[in-house]
Amino acid sequence: MSQYKVRNWSQYNESLKNRGSLSLWISEDSIKKWKSPKNPRFIGAPQQYSDDAILCLMTLKVVYHLPYRQLIGFIQYIFRLMGEVLPIPHFTTVAARAKQLVTTFKKLSRKNPTDLVLDSSGFKIYGEGEWKVRQHGKQMRRRWKKFHIGICPDSHEVIVAEVKELEIADCEIGPELIKKAPRSVKRVIGDGAYDTFECYKSAHEKHLRLLAPPRQGAILNESDEPWVVPRNEAITQIIGFGNDEGAISLWKKLSGYHRRSLVETSFSRFKGIFGGKLFSKTIDSQEVELLVKAHAMNEMTRVGMPKGVMIRR
């Protein structure tokens, strides 16, 4: 029997406390870049607030779970305590400008991982409350968004992300995530949902190796296309191990597939911090909300993470 034991509790406790520090979310750099720089090529009225300022406000909103109006009152009081004399946007300005932050998240992390682990999870947009549904039945069709991410299994940071409708399958978004992978990535790990020729083809075009368990009953593909080679190798190995559940389990251990569970841990941490519901109503705002939350979780991850070892008993 094995047990996971954390070895850096004192440092990890400090990092958990630092996650609530305002200095982490309102940095000196964000204060310096609060006002939008003048752009002589810009036509029309210049923007008063930079994207860094809007991102700072949106990060405070998702971290401290503040509605827009309370967010403005919160930052006004903080600036007063800091002695900063800076203009503060109207809450409608923050809501409108937040939709334009998508381009800011082209690169969520500065890490250059060699492995990228893919998965997705659903987030509720609106719907009747759980108690009301149980008592009176479902009255409104519930809507969900699916958040597709790729994490670095070493740093646990979100590297790439896509926000799509719940009905879109993981295998359809897999190629998009693979194409956005940094050049440093050599291997992509995903569950059986990514065991499709399109995912293998996208990985081959990026000079990556896709590691996904073949689906039940998978057979060797006789095509001479190069991207089917990794899948055929996996099927051959599983057949050699006995072609049963034990063989698949052994293949997962020997291939390094076990690292895929880290992305499930990331989603568990994500929903534990920010919840499983979205406050935004429009599609653009929902995408930005999830990306801002991923950005905030990356910041928390950089502050400190538990480091442990497996102890056999």
Image: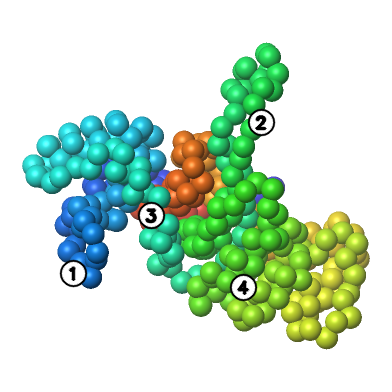
Other-residue count near label 1 (Cα within 10 Å), few / some / many at <14 / 14–19 / ≥20: few
Q: Upstream in the sequence, badge 4 or badge 1?
A: 1
- For label 2, the SS is loop
- Identified at 78% across, 78% down, the residue is 228
Determine which of the numbered discs, if any, sits on residue 261 in the image.
none
Rounded to the nearest angstrom, the CA distance separating label 4 from label 2 is 39 Å
Per the model, the C-alpha gap separating discs 3 and 2 is 29 Å
Dot 1: element: loop
How many tags in the picture? 4
Q: Earlier in the sequence, mark 3 or mark 1?
A: 1
Amino acid marked by disc 3:
Gln
Q: Which percent across, then down, holds residue 233?
A: 80, 77
Q: Which mark is residue 141?
A: 2
Say if residue 306 shows up in the picture: no
The residue under the point 35% across, 42% down is: 95
Of the image marks 3 and 4, the number of the one nearer the N terminus: 3
User: Which-is-in-front pick, marks 4 and 1?
Assistant: 1
In the picture of the structure, the residue carrying the numbered disc 3 is 100
- Vertical arrangement, residue 96 with respect to residue 160, above or below: above
x%, y% of residue 287? 49, 50
Q: Amino acid at mark 2?
A: Arg
Q: Left or right: 82 with respect to 53?
A: left
The answer to whether the residue labelled 4 contacts the one labelled 2, judged by CB atoms less than 8 Å apart, is no
Q: Quadrant of residue 175?
A: bottom right
Secondary structure under tag 3 reads helix
Pick the residue in front: 57 or 38. 38
Looking at the image, is mark 4 or mark 2 nearer the viewer?
Answer: 2
